Image (cartoon, rainbow, N blue to C red):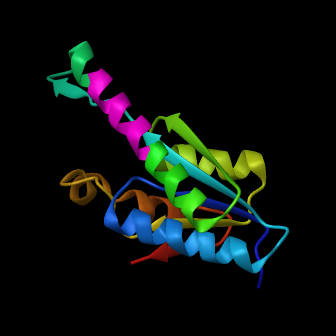
Amino acid sequence: MLFSKIVAAYDGSKAGTKALDKAIELAKLNPDATLEVLHVFDFPRFYVADGFAPVPASVNEEFYELAEKTVEEAKKRLEEAGVNATVQLMQGAPAEVILDYTKKNHNDLIVIGSRGLGGIREFVLGSVSHNVVQHARIPVLVVK
């Protein structure tokens, strides 16, 4: 089965890098395929009692700079592989953004790493890949 509109979720992690490599491989199988790489980041939130504590602007700036660096890494990998693809930086809850994006753009495959950079949150809230697999209406390839 060849896919024509592939989305790769990339977060710069080891599994994310393997997922991007697999997405590149799949895109090369079909000359008509398009590959769209998404890096989704979210600003940190600190909960205090019933509300949010303000996050220093410098912390948000550091998160954004890291996100931009991750996008540049993805572009470099795509260029080295000789694949024409788009790379987008998006902000929000990663699983929600990936699912919304694929629905709006009528993609036919999501490629995602099995474990990202989520740390302890994965155990408390469930991992991004697990959430995507559970709610996607198109095939999801989870790369280990």
Res. 115 visible in picture: no
Name which residue lies at 71% across and 75% down. 28
Closer to us: 78 or 64 = 78
Q: Residue 98's x, y, as percent?
A: 56, 50
Considering only vertical position in the picture, is 20 above or below 65?
below
- The quadrant the C terminus occupies is bottom left
Name which residue lies at 56% across and 67% down. 111
Name which residue lies at 33% across and 37% down. 66
- Total number of numbered discs in the rendering: 0
- The quadrant the N terminus occupies is bottom right
Considering only vertical position in the picture, is 68 above or below 18?
above
Q: Residue 34's x, y, as percent?
A: 76, 60
Name which residue lies at 19% across and 27% down. 47
Considering only vertical position in the picture, is 57 above or below 33?
above
Q: Tell me: 78 left or right of 124.
A: right
Res. 143 visible in picture: yes
Q: Determine the image quadrant of residue 24.
A: bottom right
Which residue in the rendered view is the most extreme toward the left? Answer: 49
Q: Main secondary structure of the magenta part?
A: helix
Q: Residue 101's x, y, as percent?
A: 65, 46
Q: Residue 4's x, y, as percent?
A: 79, 68
Which residue in the rendered view is the most extreme toward the right? Answer: 32
Q: Is residue 17 magenta?
A: no
Query: Magenta region: which residues?
Result: 60-70
Q: Tell me: 36 left or right of 42.
A: right
Q: Tell me: 35 left or right of 33.
A: left
